[in-house]
Amino acid sequence: MRKKSILMRLSAALLAVLCIFAAAPGMQARALNMGSLNVSFADVGKDDWFYEYVTFCASLGIIEGKEDGLYHPDDQLKRGEFMKLLSYIGDLVPYTWDTSVHWAQPYWQLMNDNGVLWGIDEVVCTYSSLEQPISRYEMSVMINNLCSNVYSETPVTLESPSSVIGDYDSMASKYHESVIQAFGKGILDGYEDGNFHGDNTLTRAQAAAVVVRTAVTSERLEVEDAAEVETPTGGDVTMNPQDSFAWRSRSMIDAWGNPNSEARLLLFGDSSKTYFSGNEANLSDYIVTIQVRTWDINSSGQKYTRTWNLQVNKMVEDEVKAIFEYIYNDPEQFPIHALGCARFGANQLRHGWGCAIDINPVENFYCYTTTTPYTAVTGTTCYKYSDSPYCITPDSSVVEAFALYGWGWGGGTAENGYSGWTTTADYMHFSILSSGG
């Protein structure tokens, strides 16, 4: 890995990137706050490796010093601070300024609603959580989700990850995909010893470099063994819908989502398990990465093809490919700008099995249905209140495709007026349960 020529041309590079991304199909314009603030910090000298990163970001209003006027480059960066940085470079504007929990609460809500926090269940909206220093693992997950769900970037593959990331084989499997993406795209690099050291925290100096590399693709590190994933053709999707695991598992999983011993062996390889924690040594034997293609809408309003990496249980990989190919080939050309799949932990329901999919969370919210209008928990709206092309409707090809293969929708059925479950609905959510739970 070697570094490109850098930073003397950052301003020109950023302006060029903004123009390119505004015109390129589906690529989000990195509409940073293009100010021209004259900012300097007494503790950031011209000979420091991070000098130009920090001063550049500060001049754009992306980062700022602390109350004493200093930058404190060696201080640990907190989770809440990193979320604020990502909201700036993602051009995500808070729609609520409720700071009753923490000053970064509006930014946490943005990250949560836009799928940036998918995969890190421990990053919750509490004071103590947002005050925690952010780890490199957490940072890699957020960056991967931002690049995919906000920037609409194509994922990359990394040839033999363990040969270029020394501690790849020893890190928890749940971080593998995010580390590959953040490392392979040249946003994060390893240490001099060749390891990623994902449990290490991020300093404020390092954060400035990460922000620049994330927002300005020309300033990313070159990674020789990385290549963009090729768009799948769909030619390998030849599954009979009735052969899907969702249909076959009806006799093995009850209506409440409790799998019997046979289902547990198939899903987890262990009759005593009910979900993946993400730390299992055999996780990669059951959770696989597949590629699917979808439509999205670019800045000119034109639809174009996107490629996604999805982590799902091997029991459903063929049907998930078939479902998305059905959606892609349907004349509706339903657009998808955010996708979530396997997430690990006790509170992730079917995501913790690798058997659930979330689509466009902002426009298809998880909500309480006991109020009028419904009260958003995650996301902002649904088809009942919005005509956004990203809203999933009961008669859409999305609901039709999942239902064909036995997957249920968290938006409910015609019998209950598409109001989800008893007191909640999850319009983004599909799972192998008939209820969509």
Image (spheres, grey):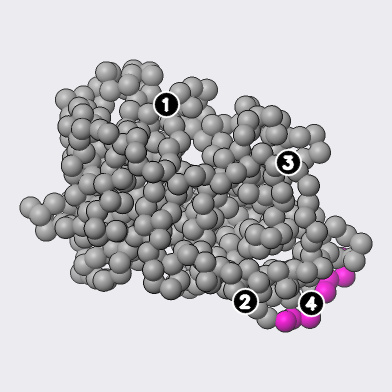
Q: Give the CA separation, mark 3 to mark 2.
A: 30 Å
Q: To which quarter of the image does residue 348 belong?
A: top left
User: In the picture shown, does residue 431 fall above or below 70?
Assistant: above
Give the class, few, some or many, for how many residues have Cα within 10 Å of label 2's Cα (few <14, many ≥20).
some
Which residue is the site of mark 3? 190
Dot 2 amino acid type:
Asn
| CA distance separating discs 3 and 1 | 28 Å
Dot 3 or dot 1: first in sequence order is 3
Q: Please identify the quadrant where the C terminus is shown.
A: top left
x 29%, y 58%: residue: 333
What percent of the width, then of the height, locates residue 117?
A: 49, 52
* The one of 414 and 328 positioned closer to us in this rendering: 328
Tell me which amino acid carries mark 3: Gly
Residue wearing tag 2? 33
Q: Label 4 near label 2: C-beta < 8 Å? A: no
Please name the residue shown 87% across and 70% down the image: 42
As helix, strand or loop, the secondary structure at mark 2 comes to: loop
**For the residues marked 2 and 1, what is the alpha-carbon distance in whole angstroms?**
44 Å
Which residue is tagged 1? Answer: 286
Left or right of 29 on screen, residue 218: right
Q: How many discs mark residues in the rendered view?
A: 4
Q: Residue at x 27, y 55 (%)?
A: 427
Place of residue 38 in the rendered image (x, y in percent of width and height, measured from the top left): 79, 81
Q: Earlier in the sequence, mark 2 or mark 4?
A: 2
- Residue under numbered circle 4: 39
- Residue 323, given in percent of the width and then of the height, sits at 28, 43
Q: Earlier in the sequence, mark 1 or mark 4?
A: 4
Image point (39%, 68%), residue name: 302
Amino acid identity at mark 1: Tyr
Q: CA distance from mark 4 to mark 3?
A: 30 Å
- In primary-sequence order, the first of circles 2 and 1 is 2
